[in-house]
């Protein structure tokens, strides 16, 4: 898990250093000098591990699914709640599950990319 | 965490239109009721809506807070009903006339169609919101 846990440290996204930002760097060299320092500071303080974040995500998805099940149950039992609330909560749980699967796919993809790196 | 944005507003609108449909059903069902709970002929009910500010910790930023809809009141239409001469009816007055409910079936059908279409429009919004969320997840593919 230590390999995966280190992914949490990659908070300064590589996408932030697009060509658009380079232009401002050229205009103000002072910012360029500041940037590496702030990046180094972020790397020094360990952020929450990716495993923990993923665990929270899984918990949220589970909560959404149990919510949907509860609402559907109360609608079927004729207690309270409307039909659309049940369907909407089910859809929300489905979207949350898809998001979780997508995050997992990305994670495995990046891991495989690292393993393919020639040493 | 709300993944499908704006779904709460749509859900409240669905609720409101659902109430309106229920009231239309009640009006149509009681179109011939000459004796309601208070002993007088049934008076048709009218639903009014009002906006409701959604309190979401993340969503409320200045004036951009989403406003949902809710049922403000269910009022009674007090226009007098039609008088029909029917001395056989137990509810007939001394002069033999019966006051019928002030329900006009044509109005109620128009209300029914409007409420159904509004409900369908909100369903489309919900469907679209879900589709957008699923399309967004396809960025990574």
Image (spheres, rainbow, N blue to C red):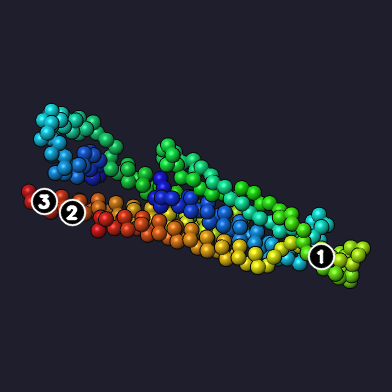
User: Quadrant where the C terminus of chain B lies?
Assistant: bottom left
- Discs 3/1, front: 1
- Discs 2/1, front: 1
Q: Residues within 10 Å of mark 1 (few under 14, many from 20)?
A: some
Q: Earlier in the sequence, mark 2 or mark 3?
A: 2
Marked residue chain, label 3 = A
Between the C-alphas of marks 2 and 1, the distance is 83 Å
Secondary structure beneath dot 1 equals strand
x 13%, y 31%: residue: A28
x 71%, y 59%: residue: B44
* Residue that mark 3 sits on: A117
* Residue that mark 1 sits on: B83
Q: Quadrant of residue B94?
A: bottom right
Between the C-alphas of marks 2 and 3, the distance is 9 Å
The number of callouts visible is: 3
Q: Residues within 10 Å of mark 3 (few under 14, many from 20)?
A: few
Residue A82: x %, y % from top left? 56, 57
* Residue that mark 2 sits on: A112
Secondary structure beneath dot 2 equals helix
B67 vs A85: above or below: above
User: Quadrant where the N terminus of chain B lies?
Assistant: top left
Marked residue chain, label 2 = A
Q: Residues within 10 Å of mark 2 (few under 14, many from 20)?
A: few
x 89%, y 67%: residue: B96
- Of residue B58 and residue A53, the one placed in the foreground of this image is B58
> Does residue A78 appear to the left or right of B138 in the view shown?
right
Residue B72 visible, this orientation:
yes
């Amino acid at each position: 898990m230590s390999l995966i846990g280190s992914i949490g440290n990659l908070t300064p996204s590589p996408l932030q250093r697009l060509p658009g930002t380079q232009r401002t760097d050229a205009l103000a060299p002072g910012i360029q000098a500041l940037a590496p320092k702030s990046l180094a500071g972020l790397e020094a303080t360990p952020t929450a591990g990716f495993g923990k974040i993923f665990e929270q995500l899984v918990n949220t998805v589970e909560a959404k699914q149990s919510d949907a099940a509860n609402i559907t149950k109360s609608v079927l039992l004729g207690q309270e709640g409307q039909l659309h609330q049940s369907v909407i909560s089910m859809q929300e749980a489905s979207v949350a599950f898809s998001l979780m699967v997508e995050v997992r796919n990305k994670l495995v993809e990046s891991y495989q990319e690292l393993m393919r790196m020639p040493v | 965490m709300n993944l499908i944005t704006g779904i709460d507003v749509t859900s409240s609108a669905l609720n409101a239109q659902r109430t309106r449909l229920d009231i239309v059903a009640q009006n149509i069902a009681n179109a011939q009721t000459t004796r309601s709970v208070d002993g007088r002929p049934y008076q048709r009910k009218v639903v009014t809506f009002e906006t409701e500010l959604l309190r979401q910790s993340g969503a409320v930023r200045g004036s951009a807070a989403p406003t949902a809809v809710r049922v403000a009141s269910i009022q009674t239409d007090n226009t007098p009903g039609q008088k029909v001469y029917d001395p056989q009816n137990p509810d007939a007055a001394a002069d033999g006339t019966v006051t019928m409910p002030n329900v006009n079936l044509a109005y109620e059908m128009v209300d029914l169609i409007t409420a159904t279409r509004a409900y369908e429009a909100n369903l489309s919004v919900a469907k679209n919101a879900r589709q957008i969320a699923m399309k967004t997840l396809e960025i990574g593919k």
